[in-house]
Image: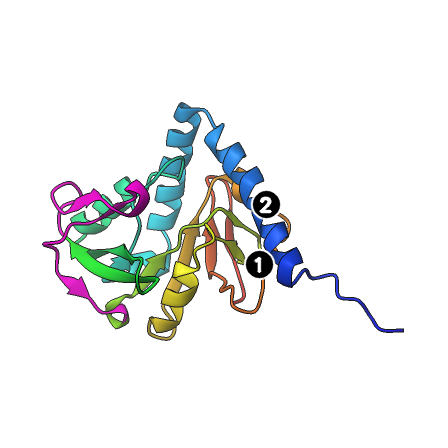
């Protein structure tokens, strides 16, 4: 008798991702603002102590949108340490992320795709090969480093363009950690997942 895989694929994989995404986003949106702010500070402190962050000269980050954890304090700390901060802009035509260096988190940032904070048009472009460490956003993660994104596939297309060995670090609230993220062959994992209370070093 043919063995049936327990891993979802095709339409089942898409449905599993959609259901998990809706559940986690609802739980994240329901977090108390004060609790969310305190948790974000704890995440930022933990990431700032990682060797991969400390040793990076050029950091790719995203600024918070909606109920995401607030990365601004971490990005500002990186700037204060003399690191370069790079933010992505969505190119909807190419369905890719284009990267730009920012020196000021206020003056160099403007609302972009779907209102997401993006680098302003005057900021200089950066090649993916210049990145030393990337803060990967996501909706849900598991202890093995598998990631559920927002469904656009932008980071799954970007990360293979980075130089080999670039650290992939994800910050998340504890409610965003699940036992196993449904994933396919094109879904890329991260190296480290950091929550306010735990740090998962994965085996990518």
Where on the picture, by quarter, is residue 128?
A: bottom left
**Residue stretch rendered in magenta on the structure:** 103-128
Work out whether mark 1 precedes mark 2 in sequence or the reverse, and give the earlier one: 2
* Local SS, label 1: loop
Residue count near mark 2 (Cα–Cα under 10 Å), binned few <14, some 14–19, many ≥20: some
- Report if residue 181 is visible in the image: no
Which label sits in the foreground, 1 or 2?
Answer: 2
**Residue beneath the point at 57% across and 54% down:** 143
Q: Quadrant of the N terminus?
A: bottom right
The answer for how far apart the CA atoms under marks 1 and 2 are is 17 Å
Nearer to me, 102 or 154: 154
Q: Which mark is residue 144?
A: 1
**126 with respect to 51 (left or right):** left
Residue marked by disc 2: 20
**Residue beneath the point at 62% across and 51% down:** 15
Q: Which mark is residue 70?
A: none
The residue most toward the right is: 1
- Give coordinates of residue 64: x percent, y percent: 33, 41
The residue most toward the front is: 93
* Local SS, label 2: helix
């Amino acid at each position: 008798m043919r063995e049936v895989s327990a891993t979802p694929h095709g339409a089942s994989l898409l449905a599993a991702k959609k259901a998990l995404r809706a559940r986690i986003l609802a739980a994240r949106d329901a977090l108390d603002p004060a609790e969310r702010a305190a948790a974000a500070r704890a995440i930022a402190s933990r990431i700032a102590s990682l060797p991969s962050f400390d040793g990076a000269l050029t950091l790719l980050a995203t600024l918070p949108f909606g109920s995401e954890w607030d990365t601004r304090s971490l990005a500002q700390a990186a700037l204060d340490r003399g690191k370069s901060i790079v933010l992505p802009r969505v190119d909807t035509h190419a369905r890719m992320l284009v990267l730009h260096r920012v020196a000021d988190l206020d003056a160099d940032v403007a609302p972009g795709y779907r209102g997401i904070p993006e680098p302003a048009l005057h900021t200089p472009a950066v090649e993916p090969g210049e990145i030393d460490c990337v803060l990967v956003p996501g909706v849900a993660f598991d202890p093995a480093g598998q990631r559920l994104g927002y469904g656009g596939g932008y980071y799954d297309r970007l990360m293979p363009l980075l130089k080999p060995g670039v650290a992939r670090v994800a910050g998340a609230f504890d409610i965003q950690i699940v036992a196993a993220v449904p994933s396919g062959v094109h879904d890329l994992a991260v190296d480290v997942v950091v929550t306010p209370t735990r740090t998962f070093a994965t085996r990518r």
